[in-house]
Each structure stands twice: as structure tokens, then as C-alpha cells.
Amino acid sequence: MVKTFTFIRFLALLLVLLVCQFVSAQTLKEFFNSSEVPLTYLGIDFTRTKVLNEMVPALDWKEKHFPSMNQVVVNDTSKFDFRKAFTKSNIIYNTKTALARIESINAEKITGESGTDEVKLSKADIDGIAGAYKDAGKKGIGLLFIVENIDKKKVEESLHVALIDLSTGKVLITERFTEKPAGFGIRNYWVKPVRNVVENIQKSRYKKWKENAG
């Protein structure tokens, strides 16, 4: 009797997982096949970011530069053109969660040195961060940038792009990029890699993601 009950529970769990996978696949397919399905831009998550070999005080990153990097993406839609990159007619901006999560960062843990303090996020790490953005929109797909390392010595920034099912917090697509910074001022210099990724999505990655989604 116990074995039968356990087997039934297993089958029920398996059914739930299959249904969730099917729904996610359908959601992603609809997203890629219709320009009318909106994209919600969720911002840049810095909660696991390490700033390496920079002389700028850690508290300045938390209180000034991280928030302003989030804001410039929202303000300058011509340079961060999600409409073109994702072929969408409607982009919703909701960076409240990203900004709130910046406030929770321990400033003492932001800065470090190359090698010993570098961050390499796992799939489980990405899933955990994405889960915090569940219900950041009523439904649909959310776009989140997750920064790993801002490295002045290497002159590069590593970051992940994640497309998230907002109803479940599940990561549907994620990809890691390493990009070069450029520009004047700390904000513009270190937000340039995000712009590079948006341009990369427009040039090739969006098409590849769409093909993989079926």
C-alpha cells in the first residue's frame, strides 16, 4: 500500500513537471513568434557582483553607480533598443526589484582583486537570482542582466542575460557574455558592456534563441 501511494505521488509530480515544461515552451514560442507579446525589462542585478581592482569606494558603487547604471538603460532607449533587439512593439520597464535588491547588498563585499575574488555564477545561482523577480510583471517574459565581475585590470565585464517566465520565476534562456567597457565616467564606462550585449542580441543571438525555441 505504501509503495503504491509513493508511486502515485511520483507520477503526479512527474505530470506537474511535464505540464510546467510544456507551458514554458509554449510561452517562449509565443514570445518569439509574435511582436505583440510584450517584453518586461527587469534591470541589472548586482547582488552577486564583484568590482575588481577599482579604486572607487565600495559604498559609491552601491549608492551611486549601480542605481545609475540601471537608470541609464531605462532613460536612453535609443542606445539600449530592446524593441529592435527583440523585435517587439511593446517594452515594459519595471526595475523596482533590481533597485530594491541593490539596497540589500553588503557594501563591504563588493570590491576585490582579480583571481582570488572573481565570481563565476552557476546555473543554480542564476536560477536563484531570477526567482526573486517572480511576479515582477503580471505575466509574460522578463529580461534581466546579471553582472558577475567588473574588472578594471582585465578591462572587461562578465554578465549573464536571462529571459524569465514572470509567472513562475523560471529561467527560460540564459547566456553568459564577456564584454569590453568604453566611454566617459564610471557609469557610462561600465554600462557599455550591457549595450554591447543588446547589440549582440539584435545581430545574432535573438535569431539563434528563436531557432532553438522552435
Image: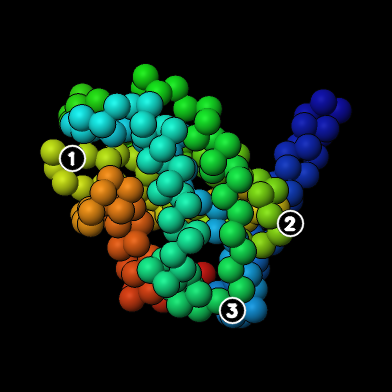
**Neighbour class for label 1 at 10 Å: few (<14), some, many (≥20)?**
some
Q: CA distance from mark 2 to mark 1?
A: 38 Å
- Look at the picture and state if 167 lies above or below 195: above
Is residue 37 at all visible to an observer of this figure? yes
Quarter of the picture containing the N terminus is top right
**Residue located at (81% from left, 34% from top):** 4
Front residue of 201 and 152 = 152
Front-most of residues 99 and 38? 99
> Which residue ends up furthest to the top in the rendered image?
108
Residue ID at (26%, 49%): 185
The residue beneath circle 1 is: 152
From the image, tell me which residue sits under label 2.
138
Under mark 3, the amino acid is: Ser
Tag 2, which secondary structure? Answer: loop
Q: Residue furthest left?
A: 153
Q: Residue at x 77, y 32 (%)?
A: 6
Q: Which residue is mark 3?
A: 89
| Three-letter amino acid code at the position of disc 2 | Lys
Q: Quadrant of residue 211?
A: bottom left
Q: Position of residue 110 (x, y in %)?
A: 35, 27
- Horizontal side, residue 67 vs residue 31: left or right: left
